[in-house]
Image (cartoon, rainbow, N blue to C red):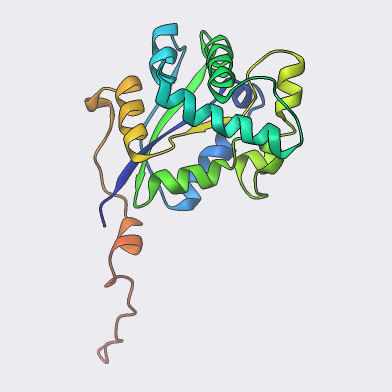
Amino acid sequence: MAKEQTLIAIKPESIQRHLVGEFIAKFEKRGLKLTACKLVSPTRKQVEAHYPDDEAWYLSSGTKTYENYRNKGIDPGMTPIELAKRTRKRLIEHLVDRPLLLMVWEGPHAVDLGRKTAGATNPLVADIGSIRGDYSTESYELADDIERAIHTLVHASGSLEEAKKEIKIWFKNEEILDFDLITENVFYSKDWGKVKKHSSKL
């Protein structure tokens, strides 16, 4: 099975809460391999590239937000596209010039496992055991009350194509390391760790 790469970013609110080590451990325990990591102060240009100004992103992001409101019986008073444009503006304001820890994780199903480990974008409905389900009291209503981006604690690429685009924004090819982990034998092969027969010789 082909290995995938996914972008995971630990957001400023998590860095402020000293949660970096715990979150990295969650991805390690999943069995994913960390191949790149750096702490940055994002520029507006980088964040705008990460959250692109295009209709496809607006529709995808805005529809999720819109459905979250409707599922709670709330009329957001905006279309999905309008909601996404507001979200993008708030994300840019939230991330520019604040520390952001960027990582590339590798392994089979890395994108899906990254998303599952992060949990649902709306922390109120995120599964217990996920990052957002265990570490957040956040909600769309709370974020809206003070007109800021919702604190989702981490970013995890939503698809393989998205991951490829995002990794190129934040990392040069030479910053992503290609190396073997001993544990990969356990995950990706079958003839390992067998008990050796005892020799009759002393």
> Observer-nearest residue: 62 or 109?
62
* Residue 164 position within the rendered picture, expressed as x and y whole percent measured from the top left: 30, 32
- On the question of residue 38 being in view, the answer is no
> Observer-nearest residue: 156 or 30?
156
* Residue 65 position within the rendered picture, expressed as x and y whole percent measured from the top left: 61, 30
Q: Quadrant of residue 63?
A: top right
Compared to 166, does 124 lie above or below? below
- On the question of residue 101 being in view, the answer is yes
> Observer-nearest residue: 132 or 124?
124
* Residue 82 position within the rendered picture, expressed as x and y whole percent measured from the top left: 57, 17
Name which residue lies at 72% across and 30% down: 138
Name which residue lies at 67% across and 37% down: 123
* Residue 58 position within the rendered picture, expressed as x and y whole percent measured from the top left: 48, 23
Question: Is 114 situated left or right of 86 in this image?
Answer: left
Compared to 8, does 11 lie above or below? above
Name which residue lies at 55% across and 16% down: 91
- Dividing the image into 4 quarters, which one contains the N terminus? bottom left
Question: Is 109 situated left or right of 76 in this image?
Answer: left
For the image, the number of numbered tags is 0
Compared to 140, does 91 lie above or below? above
Q: Quadrant of residue 23?
A: top right
- Dividing the image into 4 quarters, which one contains the C terminus? bottom left
Name which residue lies at 43% across and 35% down: 157
